[in-house]
Image (spheres, grey):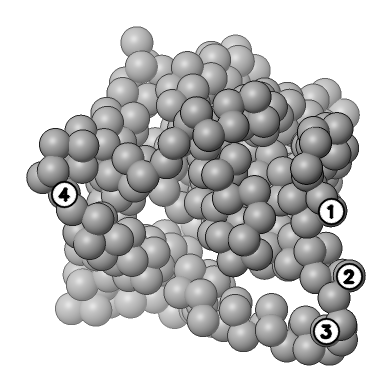
Amino acid sequence: MTILSLVAPIFGLILIGWIAALAGFLSDKVSDGLSEYVFSIAVPALILSTLTRPGLTGEITPSYWVSYFGGAGLSWLVGSLLSLRRKGVERRGAILHGFASSQSNTVFIGVPMILQAYGEEGAFPLFMLLAVHLPLMMGCATFLIEADGQTSILRRLRGLALVLLRNPIFLALIAGLALKGLGLAPTGMVKSLVDALAGTASTCALIALGAGLVRYRVLHDLPSAMVITGLKLVIHPLAVWVLAFHVFTMPPAYAGVATLFAAMPVGINAYLLASRYKTETGVVAAAVMLSTLLAIVTTIVWLTILGHA
C-alpha cells in the first residue's frame, strides 16, 4: 500500500492529463504552453528551492557516477547493436535507438517520483545526478551523431555550450550550486515566490506529459519500440542496481536514487533529438508512450525491490 500510495498520484495525474487532452479539454497549444512553463519556470524554481534549502548536504563518490552511467552505457550499447539488425536502420538511427534506451524522463516523472520516494535523503544525490545527466547524455548523443559530419570539434563544442546555456534547467542547477557554495539562499518575498512556483512543478509536469502522450502512436513500429522499452525499464535499472548495491558501496538512499532514476521511462529529449535529425522519429515517439504506460507496472516492481534492499 505504501508503494501504491507513491505510484498512484504520479501516474494518476498523467492519466488525467491524457484523458483531458483526448476529450478535447486541453488543446495542443495549452499542452505545449504547460510543458514550456514546467521546463522553463516551475522545475528550475524547484531546483533552486531544493538546492538552497538549509541542511541539504552530501558527498558524491565516484562509485555513484560509475553505477549510474555504467548501466546507461550498457543499455545504450545494447540498444544500438540490436537496432542494426533491423532493416533500414543506419548509423544515426542506431545511435538514437541506444540513446532512447538509456535516456530517462527525469523532469516530468523522475524528479517528482524520487522526491516522493526518498524525500530529503534523496534530494542531494538526485539533483547532483540531474546536473551531470543532462549535459553528458545530450553531449554524447550529439557528438556521436555528428561525428561523420564536416563540423569541426571546436564548433561542436561551441554549439553544445550554447544549447546548455539556453537550457533553463541547466542554468538553474548551476545557479543553485553556486548559491549553495556561497552559503546564500532566497529569503522573504523572493523565497515565497520561488517556493510557490516550485510547488506547481510536479502537478503541471505530469499533466503536461499525459496530455502530450495523445500525439504519439505506439503501433508505428511496435517491435522496435518494445525493445527500447525493455532496455529502458528493465536492463538499464537492473545494471545500475547490480553496480550500486552489489559491486560498490554507497548509502542506500544514493543507490536507490540511481536505480529509480534509471527505471524511469524514455525521456522526451530522445524524441526531440530524433525530430532534430529527422530519423527514427516514429519509433522513438512510440517508445516514449509505451515505456510511460508500462512504467506504471515496472515502477511498482522496482520500488518493491528497493524497499526490500
**Cα–Cα gap, marks 1 and 4:** 38 Å
Look at discs 1 and 4 and give the one toward the viewer.
Answer: 1
Q: Residue at x 13, y 43 (%)?
A: 24
Q: Secondary structure at mark 2?
A: helix
Looking at the rendered image, the quarter that the C terminus falls into is top right
**Cα–Cα gap, marks 4 and 3:** 41 Å
The residue where tag 2 is placed is 148
Q: Is residue 126 above or below residue 260?
A: below
- Amino acid identity at mark 2: Asp
Nearer to the camera, 177 or 300: 300
> Can you tell which mark lies on residue 26?
4
- Amino acid identity at mark 1: Arg
The residue where tag 3 is placed is 151
Q: Residue at x 45, y 74 (%)?
A: 168
Cβ atoms at labels 2 and 1 below 8 Å apart: yes
Q: Residue at x 55, y 44 (%)?
A: 282
The residue where tag 1 is placed is 91
Cβ atoms at labels 1 and 4 below 8 Å apart: no
- Quarter where residue 236 is shown: top right
- Amino acid identity at mark 3: Thr
Residue 140, x across and y down, in percent: 78, 62
Q: Which is nearer the N-term, disc 3 or disc 1?
A: 1
